[in-house]
Image: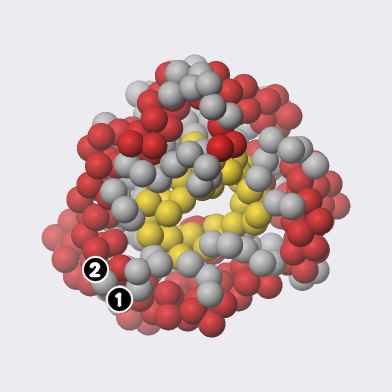
Amino acid sequence: MDVDVKRYMEVGIIHHMVYQKVFSDEAWFERSFRTLLEDPFFDVIETAESPFASMPGKIRSWVDQAHVKVAYGGQSRTLSRKLNINALDKSERNKALETLKQGIDEAAEMGAFGFSFLSGHYENNRIDEAMDALVESCCILCEYAKQYHLPLCLEAFDHEIDKKALIGPSFRAKEMCQRVCSVEPSFGLLVDCSHIPMIGETLDENLDPVVGFVKHAHMGNTVIKDRTNPSYGDTHPRFGFPGSENDTEYLSRYLKKLIEIGYLEKDHPRPVSFEVKPQAGEESSLVLANAKRTLNRAWLYV
Protein backbone atom coordinates (compact mmCIF):
# COMPACT_ATOMS: atom_id res chain seq x y z
CA MET A 1 0.00 0.00 0.00
CA ASP A 2 1.32 3.42 -0.92
CA VAL A 3 -0.25 5.10 2.13
CA ASP A 4 1.98 5.46 5.22
CA VAL A 5 1.37 2.58 7.65
CA LYS A 6 1.03 5.11 10.48
CA ARG A 7 -2.21 6.40 8.93
CA TYR A 8 -3.71 3.00 9.72
CA MET A 9 -1.98 1.77 12.85
CA GLU A 10 -0.16 2.73 15.97
CA VAL A 11 2.81 0.39 15.80
CA GLY A 12 3.55 -1.21 19.16
CA ILE A 13 6.10 -3.52 20.74
CA ILE A 14 5.96 -5.76 23.82
CA HIS A 15 9.00 -4.64 25.79
CA HIS A 16 9.59 -7.71 27.96
CA MET A 17 9.33 -10.08 24.99
CA VAL A 18 11.92 -8.51 22.74
CA TYR A 19 14.21 -7.71 25.69
CA GLN A 20 14.58 -10.72 27.98
CA LYS A 21 15.25 -10.69 31.73
CA VAL A 22 14.15 -7.07 32.17
CA PHE A 23 12.21 -7.99 35.30
CA SER A 24 15.34 -9.27 37.04
CA ASP A 25 17.48 -6.17 36.47
CA GLU A 26 16.04 -2.71 37.12
CA ALA A 27 18.83 -0.87 35.28
CA TRP A 28 18.35 -3.12 32.22
CA PHE A 29 14.59 -2.57 32.39
CA GLU A 30 15.03 1.19 32.31
CA ARG A 31 17.69 1.20 29.61
CA SER A 32 15.84 -1.11 27.25
CA PHE A 33 12.45 0.55 27.83
CA ARG A 34 13.92 3.95 27.05
CA THR A 35 15.56 2.55 23.92
CA LEU A 36 12.10 1.73 22.60
CA LEU A 37 10.71 5.09 23.65
CA GLU A 38 13.48 6.83 21.74
CA ASP A 39 12.65 4.93 18.54
CA PRO A 40 10.08 6.93 16.51
CA PHE A 41 8.95 3.72 14.79
CA PHE A 42 6.93 2.84 17.90
CA ASP A 43 3.77 4.55 19.10
CA VAL A 44 2.80 1.98 21.76
CA ILE A 45 4.91 0.13 24.34
CA GLU A 46 3.36 -2.84 26.10
CA THR A 47 4.53 -3.89 29.54
CA ALA A 48 3.45 -6.15 32.39
CA GLU A 49 3.72 -6.74 36.14
CA SER A 50 6.89 -5.14 37.45
CA PRO A 51 8.84 -6.15 40.58
CA PHE A 52 10.22 -2.63 40.81
CA ALA A 53 8.01 -0.38 42.94
CA SER A 54 9.10 2.86 41.28
CA MET A 55 8.56 1.64 37.72
CA PRO A 56 4.86 2.48 37.15
CA GLY A 57 5.46 6.12 38.06
CA LYS A 58 8.60 6.29 35.93
CA ILE A 59 6.81 4.71 32.97
CA ARG A 60 3.99 7.23 33.23
CA SER A 61 6.50 10.10 33.09
CA TRP A 62 8.58 8.58 30.28
CA VAL A 63 5.71 7.78 27.92
CA ASP A 64 4.25 11.24 28.46
CA GLN A 65 7.56 12.87 27.56
CA ALA A 66 8.05 10.62 24.53
CA HIS A 67 4.46 11.11 23.28
CA VAL A 68 3.92 7.34 23.31
CA LYS A 69 1.06 5.22 24.67
CA VAL A 70 1.48 2.36 27.12
CA ALA A 71 -0.62 -0.81 27.38
CA TYR A 72 -0.57 -3.40 30.17
CA GLY A 73 -0.63 -7.15 29.67
CA GLY A 74 -2.01 -9.02 32.65
CA GLN A 75 -1.44 -12.45 31.11
CA SER A 76 1.74 -13.13 33.06
CA ARG A 77 0.02 -12.40 36.37
CA THR A 78 -2.14 -15.52 36.05
CA LEU A 79 0.26 -17.67 34.01
CA SER A 80 3.18 -17.28 36.44
CA ARG A 81 0.95 -18.14 39.39
CA LYS A 82 -0.89 -20.96 37.58
CA LEU A 83 -4.22 -19.20 38.16
CA ASN A 84 -7.36 -19.52 36.09
CA ILE A 85 -10.19 -16.98 35.79
CA ASN A 86 -12.55 -19.66 34.51
CA ALA A 87 -11.69 -22.23 37.20
CA LEU A 88 -14.79 -24.09 38.33
CA ASP A 89 -13.60 -23.81 41.95
CA LYS A 90 -14.71 -20.32 42.98
CA SER A 91 -11.91 -19.86 45.52
CA GLU A 92 -9.32 -20.54 42.80
CA ARG A 93 -11.14 -18.19 40.46
CA ASN A 94 -11.12 -15.47 43.09
CA LYS A 95 -7.33 -15.75 43.43
CA ALA A 96 -7.01 -15.08 39.71
CA LEU A 97 -9.40 -12.14 39.93
CA GLU A 98 -7.49 -10.64 42.82
CA THR A 99 -4.13 -10.61 41.01
CA LEU A 100 -5.75 -9.17 37.89
CA LYS A 101 -7.37 -6.42 39.96
CA GLN A 102 -3.90 -5.61 41.32
CA GLY A 103 -2.71 -5.48 37.72
CA ILE A 104 -5.51 -3.07 36.81
CA ASP A 105 -4.39 -0.84 39.70
CA GLU A 106 -0.81 -0.95 38.41
CA ALA A 107 -1.93 -0.26 34.83
CA ALA A 108 -3.88 2.78 35.98
CA GLU A 109 -0.86 4.05 37.92
CA MET A 110 1.29 4.02 34.79
CA GLY A 111 -1.44 5.64 32.69
CA ALA A 112 -2.15 2.63 30.47
CA PHE A 113 -4.83 3.00 27.81
CA GLY A 114 -5.82 -0.66 28.01
CA PHE A 115 -5.45 -3.89 30.01
CA SER A 116 -5.43 -7.41 28.57
CA PHE A 117 -5.56 -10.89 30.08
CA LEU A 118 -6.34 -14.46 29.02
CA SER A 119 -8.65 -17.31 29.83
CA GLY A 120 -7.44 -20.47 31.54
CA HIS A 121 -7.44 -24.23 31.15
CA TYR A 122 -10.71 -26.13 30.82
CA GLU A 123 -12.17 -29.62 30.89
CA ASN A 124 -13.67 -30.78 27.58
CA ASN A 125 -16.76 -32.19 29.29
CA ARG A 126 -17.42 -28.98 31.28
CA ILE A 127 -16.92 -26.24 28.69
CA ASP A 128 -20.33 -24.64 29.28
CA GLU A 129 -19.58 -24.26 32.99
CA ALA A 130 -16.15 -22.83 32.21
CA MET A 131 -17.71 -20.32 29.79
CA ASP A 132 -20.17 -19.21 32.47
CA ALA A 133 -17.31 -18.74 34.94
CA LEU A 134 -15.26 -16.82 32.37
CA VAL A 135 -18.08 -14.44 31.50
CA GLU A 136 -18.75 -13.79 35.18
CA SER A 137 -15.05 -13.08 35.79
CA CYS A 138 -14.80 -10.73 32.81
CA CYS A 139 -17.83 -8.76 34.01
CA ILE A 140 -16.36 -8.48 37.53
CA LEU A 141 -13.07 -7.17 36.12
CA CYS A 142 -14.83 -4.70 33.82
CA GLU A 143 -16.80 -3.35 36.75
CA TYR A 144 -13.62 -2.99 38.81
CA ALA A 145 -11.79 -1.18 35.99
CA LYS A 146 -14.58 1.40 35.61
CA GLN A 147 -13.11 3.43 38.46
CA TYR A 148 -10.12 4.11 36.20
CA HIS A 149 -12.07 4.34 32.91
CA LEU A 150 -9.77 1.55 31.73
CA PRO A 151 -11.07 -0.69 28.93
CA LEU A 152 -10.28 -4.42 29.09
CA CYS A 153 -9.77 -7.05 26.44
CA LEU A 154 -9.18 -10.78 26.55
CA GLU A 155 -6.49 -12.27 24.33
CA ALA A 156 -7.33 -15.37 22.29
CA PHE A 157 -4.66 -18.05 22.77
CA ASP A 158 -4.31 -21.62 21.50
CA HIS A 159 -6.69 -24.17 23.01
CA GLU A 160 -4.79 -27.42 22.41
CA ILE A 161 -1.05 -26.89 21.81
CA ASP A 162 0.65 -24.74 24.46
CA LYS A 163 -1.43 -22.48 26.72
CA LYS A 164 -4.52 -24.65 26.10
CA ALA A 165 -6.85 -21.78 26.96
CA LEU A 166 -10.63 -21.82 26.75
CA ILE A 167 -10.51 -18.81 24.36
CA GLY A 168 -9.49 -20.23 22.02
CA PRO A 169 -11.44 -20.88 18.88
CA SER A 170 -13.27 -18.02 17.22
CA PHE A 171 -16.75 -19.43 17.92
CA ARG A 172 -16.04 -19.39 21.65
CA ALA A 173 -14.44 -15.94 21.41
CA LYS A 174 -17.56 -14.66 19.68
CA GLU A 175 -19.89 -16.14 22.32
CA MET A 176 -17.80 -14.70 25.16
CA CYS A 177 -17.70 -11.23 23.60
CA GLN A 178 -21.42 -11.21 22.91
CA ARG A 179 -22.22 -12.13 26.49
CA VAL A 180 -19.75 -9.79 28.19
CA CYS A 181 -20.41 -6.86 25.84
CA SER A 182 -24.12 -7.07 26.59
CA VAL A 183 -23.12 -5.94 30.09
CA GLU A 184 -19.99 -3.87 29.31
CA PRO A 185 -19.80 -2.65 25.69
CA SER A 186 -16.22 -1.39 26.04
CA PHE A 187 -14.93 -4.96 26.52
CA GLY A 188 -13.26 -6.61 23.53
CA LEU A 189 -10.90 -9.17 22.07
CA LEU A 190 -7.14 -9.09 21.49
CA VAL A 191 -6.17 -11.09 18.40
CA ASP A 192 -2.65 -12.31 17.62
CA CYS A 193 -1.57 -13.73 14.26
CA SER A 194 0.94 -16.00 16.01
CA HIS A 195 -1.92 -17.77 17.78
CA ILE A 196 -4.19 -18.22 14.75
CA PRO A 197 -2.18 -21.11 13.22
CA MET A 198 -2.06 -22.77 16.65
CA ILE A 199 -5.84 -22.51 16.91
CA GLY A 200 -6.02 -24.24 13.53
CA GLU A 201 -8.04 -21.55 11.78
CA THR A 202 -7.51 -19.50 8.64
CA LEU A 203 -7.49 -15.71 8.90
CA ASP A 204 -11.06 -15.61 7.59
CA GLU A 205 -12.24 -18.31 9.99
CA ASN A 206 -10.60 -16.59 12.94
CA LEU A 207 -11.46 -12.95 12.32
CA ASP A 208 -14.78 -12.87 10.44
CA PRO A 209 -16.82 -14.17 13.41
CA VAL A 210 -15.48 -11.51 15.78
CA VAL A 211 -16.07 -8.44 13.62
CA GLY A 212 -16.79 -5.50 15.88
CA PHE A 213 -15.23 -7.09 18.96
CA VAL A 214 -11.51 -6.71 18.12
CA LYS A 215 -10.02 -3.96 20.30
CA HIS A 216 -6.30 -4.73 20.06
CA ALA A 217 -4.00 -6.78 17.82
CA HIS A 218 -0.58 -8.42 17.97
CA MET A 219 1.84 -9.47 15.23
CA GLY A 220 3.99 -12.53 15.72
CA ASN A 221 5.05 -16.00 14.63
CA THR A 222 4.93 -19.62 15.79
CA VAL A 223 6.46 -23.04 15.17
CA ILE A 224 3.91 -25.88 15.15
CA LYS A 225 5.12 -28.40 12.54
CA ASP A 226 7.82 -30.02 14.68
CA ARG A 227 7.10 -30.82 18.33
CA THR A 228 10.78 -31.52 18.94
CA ASN A 229 11.80 -28.00 17.93
CA PRO A 230 12.89 -25.98 21.03
CA SER A 231 10.84 -23.08 19.65
CA TYR A 232 7.65 -25.15 19.31
CA GLY A 233 4.43 -23.57 20.50
CA ASP A 234 3.82 -20.14 21.94
CA THR A 235 7.43 -18.91 21.93
CA HIS A 236 6.99 -15.98 19.50
CA PRO A 237 10.06 -16.44 17.29
CA ARG A 238 11.04 -13.78 14.78
CA PHE A 239 9.37 -13.64 11.37
CA GLY A 240 10.86 -16.14 8.93
CA PHE A 241 12.27 -18.34 11.70
CA PRO A 242 13.22 -21.78 10.27
CA GLY A 243 10.24 -24.14 10.23
CA SER A 244 7.81 -21.44 11.37
CA GLU A 245 4.38 -20.43 10.06
CA ASN A 246 4.46 -16.66 9.53
CA ASP A 247 6.57 -14.36 7.41
CA THR A 248 6.06 -11.30 5.23
CA GLU A 249 3.24 -12.69 3.07
CA TYR A 250 1.20 -13.95 6.03
CA LEU A 251 1.63 -10.68 7.91
CA SER A 252 0.49 -8.78 4.83
CA ARG A 253 -2.68 -10.88 4.58
CA TYR A 254 -3.30 -10.46 8.32
CA LEU A 255 -3.09 -6.67 8.11
CA LYS A 256 -5.31 -6.65 5.04
CA LYS A 257 -7.85 -8.73 6.97
CA LEU A 258 -7.74 -6.29 9.91
CA ILE A 259 -8.67 -3.57 7.41
CA GLU A 260 -11.46 -5.71 5.93
CA ILE A 261 -13.10 -6.30 9.31
CA GLY A 262 -12.89 -2.60 10.15
CA TYR A 263 -10.32 -2.76 12.93
CA LEU A 264 -7.79 -0.78 10.92
CA GLU A 265 -9.12 2.31 9.21
CA LYS A 266 -7.34 5.08 7.38
CA ASP A 267 -6.72 8.17 9.53
CA HIS A 268 -8.11 6.38 12.61
CA PRO A 269 -5.02 4.41 13.64
CA ARG A 270 -5.35 1.65 16.21
CA PRO A 271 -2.66 -0.32 18.05
CA VAL A 272 -1.01 -3.33 16.43
CA SER A 273 1.97 -4.55 18.46
CA PHE A 274 4.86 -6.89 17.74
CA GLU A 275 5.20 -9.85 20.08
CA VAL A 276 8.59 -11.24 19.10
CA LYS A 277 11.15 -12.96 21.29
CA PRO A 278 14.81 -13.82 20.61
CA GLN A 279 15.31 -17.57 20.50
CA ALA A 280 18.47 -19.34 21.68
CA GLY A 281 21.58 -17.56 20.43
CA GLU A 282 19.67 -14.60 18.98
CA GLU A 283 20.04 -10.89 19.73
CA SER A 284 17.24 -8.53 20.71
CA SER A 285 18.44 -5.73 18.42
CA LEU A 286 18.41 -7.98 15.36
CA VAL A 287 15.01 -9.49 16.16
CA LEU A 288 13.68 -5.96 16.58
CA ALA A 289 15.12 -4.91 13.21
CA ASN A 290 13.59 -8.06 11.67
CA ALA A 291 10.14 -7.06 12.97
CA LYS A 292 10.30 -3.51 11.64
CA ARG A 293 11.69 -4.62 8.29
CA THR A 294 9.02 -7.33 7.92
CA LEU A 295 6.21 -4.87 8.63
CA ASN A 296 7.57 -2.39 6.11
CA ARG A 297 7.75 -5.11 3.45
CA ALA A 298 4.36 -6.59 4.33
CA TRP A 299 2.65 -3.21 4.17
CA LEU A 300 3.74 -2.76 0.54
CA TYR A 301 1.40 -5.61 -0.44
CA VAL A 302 -1.61 -4.82 1.73
Three-letter code, disc 1: Val
Q: Is residue 171 left or right of residue 296?
A: left
Q: Secondary structure at mark 2?
A: helix
Mark number displayed over residue 39:
none
Q: Residues within 10 Å of mark 2 (few under 14, many from 20)?
A: some
The span from disc 2 to disc 1 (Cα, nearest Å) is 7 Å
Q: Which residue lies under the disc numbered 2? A: 179
Q: Nearer the viewer, residue 261 or 62?
A: 261
Q: Which residue lies under the disc numbered 1? A: 183
Q: Position of residue 157 (x, y in %)?
A: 37, 48
* Colour setup of the view: secondary structure
How many numbered dots are placed on residues in this image?
A: 2
Image: 35 above or below 75? above
Q: Secondary structure at mark 1?
A: loop
Q: Residue at x 63, y 72 (%)?
A: 108
Q: Position of residue 105 (x, y in %)?
A: 60, 75
Q: Residue at x 16, y 66 (%)?
A: 128
Q: Position of residue 110 (x, y in %)?
A: 69, 67
Q: Is residue 281 left or right of residue 128?
A: right
| Mark 2 touches mark 1? (CB < 8 Å) | yes
Image: 173 above or below 13? below
Locate the C terminus and report the quarter of the image it occupies: top left
Q: Is residue 270 at least partly visible in the picture?
A: yes
Q: Residue at x 36, y 44 (%)?
A: 262
